[in-house]
Image: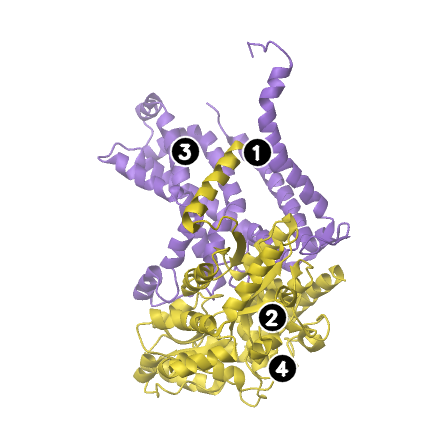
Chain colours: A purple, B yellow
Amino acid sequence: MEGRFPNRTLPYALVLPSIAIVAIFLILPSLQALYLSFFEVSPFGNRRIFVGLGNFREILTSDSYRSSLRLSLVFAVAVVVLSMSVSLGMAVLASKPLRGIGFYRTLLLWPYALSPAVAGIVWALLFEPSSGLMTYLLRLTTGLSPNWMMNANYALLVIILAAAWKMLGFNIVFFLAGLQNIPDEMVEAAQMDGASRRQTFWRVIFPILSPMTFFLFIMNSLYAFFEVFGLIDVMTQGGPGGGTEVLIYRLYQDGFISIRWGYASAQSIVLFILVSALTTLQFRYAGRRVFYA
Amino acid sequence: MSGRWKLLGAVLVTVLMAAGPAAAQVKIKLWHAMGGARYDAITKEISAGFNKLHPEYVIEPLFSGSYAETVTKGIAAIRAGDPPHILQVYEVGTQTMLDSGAFIPVTEVVKPGEIKWEDYFAPIMNYYTVGGKLSSMPFNSSTAILYYNKDAFKKAGLDPEKPPATYKDVEEMGRKILASGAARGVITFGWPAWMFEQAFAYHNQLYANNENGRKGRATQILFNGPFGVEVLTRWKKWADEKLLMYGGREYAPNKAFLSGEVAMLLQSTSQVTTIEKAAKFPVGTGFLPHLEGKPQGKSVIGGASLWVLKGKGRSPQELDAIAKFFKYIGQPEQSAKWHQDTGYFPATHASEKLLRDEGWFKKNPNHETAFKQIQAGPDTPATRGVLLGSFVQIRNITDTALEKTFSGKLSPQATLDEATQEVNKVLEEYNRLQK
């Protein structure tokens, strides 16, 4: 940095508000959660029993927690892969000079502008087992009438589709920005050298896009782990039979419906560790393949 | 600070303009979970009616989401030290509230003789009286009944005035309905775990030990015994035969029934008015179907009651306002109107008489079904309703267990065993944290 502050306290005073916000809304609650995770707490908070690592032991030995974890991983992988590949394809199409492209681009953005609750209601109505449009079309075309209130795999599939769809707009905007930043000369040079369109895309465009792809990969993973609560709450409430109870929804159930503060706090700590580990791994392995031009 | 004063000033001006000279109004916050037709009934009828009658008091109803969400919000507010004056808690939260120490018993808010408790219906009083003491104000009481689509019955060649009486009837009539194409599914139900509880009470079986938690805190759930397994095995058989079209928890299955896809629905009586209004076909109602060869019990009370929360202390005016409000909702006219608007029981004999004199039940037989059903069985520990700590969580576990069977993941015995283990652990933790 070139410039220097005239006195020593001013810079601290300037960053103080943001530090205060982070401390009050992030750090303190996290510490409190860590503290509570060693207790069993009565619903009204008037009695607590120290249980040491009891809550963590319960988490690690619980079959249902393990199945929830497996479910979350399957869910996250499916959402990230589906959402990113489809949006990359769409972004490529939307980067082409077409008539009325502004209109299409606006439409592509729409899903992201919807709140999770609204998106959830739309999808729930579409797949409603008795009167949903998709249910009707499925019955018409395949003769099957799947009921996602009863069939856990089908419920998971619908939730994955909805979650991936919800993320499309966000991904497309970033991919589109990345694509537009690629200098035309590079593409032209590749074509001059006789690269086919496929080669141009995979050998030139895709690598240049990789920082964006990596960024989106992280964002989408975080989304799939942490931000799908609204969708699931509106659509399946974790059912049927726990078939869509991903970790974050389970945390909500245990913390806010069952009011088991201690157990839920321990879960949030476990979730925090899991996601930190995952992100580190991503940076370490996927991050290496990123090509910063 | 100045912003707050401005806001206060604005509120004061508004209040003064609205209410004229009555400056020192006492405001009573009421958090409730009444959605649908019930929302208008509690806000526009009950609260507004009371406020008009008592200009010095203002009841401020606030919709707080589902029952479970309302309880959770209430608990959070109690912990934060600023709870509403009145919290509507569904029957499931009764034990938790009793153990909270955060409420003022209704019998202390209302002076003796101000409300004639003996005029209230026995099943309602029996549910909310624990250890001989009434702690909360009975408000919206329901039970579960069977709704059916008369058109579908006709189309299937069945007598549209004769709902199924037994599980066997459901199966035999159901097969006819499916074969004739009158509907694509035969039966569905809301509140699955509650229907499971109903099945126990309806056949006079205990759901939890210590007389359903009424003789002392329950420590064990009993639903993985032969009776529970038999009921769930039958339900599973219905699912396998495509008779049962499971439609999710709470009120979600209403859609399948109202769209004509499913011919019968087990649901709370709180939906009578809503369903009659929304259905495009004549709706019939009947008793819950009986499982052959099992003793006769009685369907159990559901719904919610109103709890007066202590907060940091309540002023005499506030307590007076609450007492007057409770008296108001128990009046025959109010109770009868509430019943007509929703389907919940009119709470007192006087309100029932008023409705009979009006000829209401003759004109609206579907509103009477629950009445007949709840008076038809014996009053035993099994039919007074289950009291469990952490019941909200236990309902959740039970719903999940039932769904696991319907989706074919686990057999009825296996799923109930698993759930029993889980529930007993929850009860153990709850009981450990009390006393």
- Are tags 4 and 2 found on a single chain? yes
Count every numbered label the image shows and give the total.
4
In front here: B1 or A235?
Answer: B1
Label 3 sits on a secondary structure element that is helix
- Are tags 4 and 1 found on a single chain? no
Residue B417 seen from this side = yes
Which of the two marks, 3 or 4, is nearer to us in this view?
Answer: 4
Which of the two marks, 4 or 2, is nearer to us in this view?
Answer: 4
Label 3 chain ID: A
Residue A179: name its quadrant.
top left
- Are tags 3 and 4 found on a single chain? no
In front here: B274 or A255?
Answer: B274
Label 4 chain ID: B
Amino acid under label 4?
A: Gln
Amino acid under label 1?
A: Phe
* Residue matched to label 1: A283
Tell me the tag on residue A174.
Answer: 3
* Residue matched to label 2: B415
Label 1 sits on a secondary structure element that is helix
Q: Residue at x 72, y 44 (%)?
A: A35
The CA distance from mark 1 to mark 2 is 42 Å
Q: Is disc 1 surrounded by few (<14), some (14 to 19) or many (20+) residues within 10 Å? A: some
